[in-house]
Image: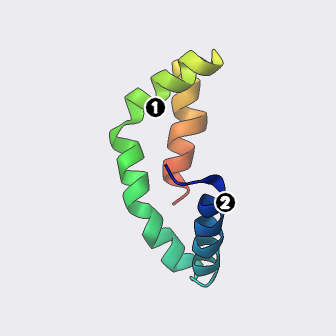
Amino acid sequence: MTDPTRQLEIARAGQHDWGRLSPTARAEALRPLAAAIGKRLDDIADLIADENGKPRAEAIAHEVLAAVQLV
């Protein structure tokens, strides 16, 4: 595992590059992530429900679908 200082340097460099992208380019870059979340919707909703005590339907509507639909 990379040491925390190196991880911070990598994150800062990535943020600088990310900040130079247009909102459209950022959305395009996030589409594969949104698709992957959508494919794992049930697993993610179950995890949220288990960890937070939230009803599964609420986890889907307020957490998972909200994240997928924002991209």
| Total numbered badges shown on the rendered structure | 2
The kind of secondary structure element at disc 2 is helix
Residue 29, given in percent of the width and then of the height, sits at 44, 69
The residue at the point 63 percent across, 72 percent down is: 15
Residue 4, given in percent of the width and then of the height, sits at 64, 53
Q: In this view, does 57 lie above or below 62?
A: above
Give, as a three-letter code, the residue at label 1: Ile
Q: Quadrant of residue 41?
A: top left
Q: Which of 66 and 46 is in front in this view?
A: 46
Instruction: Select label 1 or label 2 by which is in front.
Output: 2
The residue at the point 56 percent across, 56 percent down is: 70
Q: Nearer the viewer, residue 12 or 68?
A: 12
Residue 13, given in percent of the width and then of the height, sits at 61, 75
For label 1, the crowd category at 10 Å Cα-Cα, with few meaning under 14, some 14 to 19 and many 20 or more, is: some
The residue at the point 64 percent across, 78 percent down is: 16
The kind of secondary structure element at disc 1 is helix
Q: Mark 2 — residue?
A: 5
Residue 21, given in percent of the width and then of the height, sits at 56, 82
How far separated are the C-alphas under marks 1 and 2?
30 Å
For label 2, the crowd category at 10 Å Cα-Cα, with few meaning under 14, some 14 to 19 and many 20 or more, is: few
Give, as a three-letter code, the residue at label 2: Thr
Q: Is residue 16 above or below residue 38?
A: below
Q: Is residue 21 above or below residue 64?
A: below
The residue at the point 40 percent across, 28 percent down is: 43
Q: Mark 1 — residue?
A: 44
Q: Which of 10 and 24 is in front in this view?
A: 10
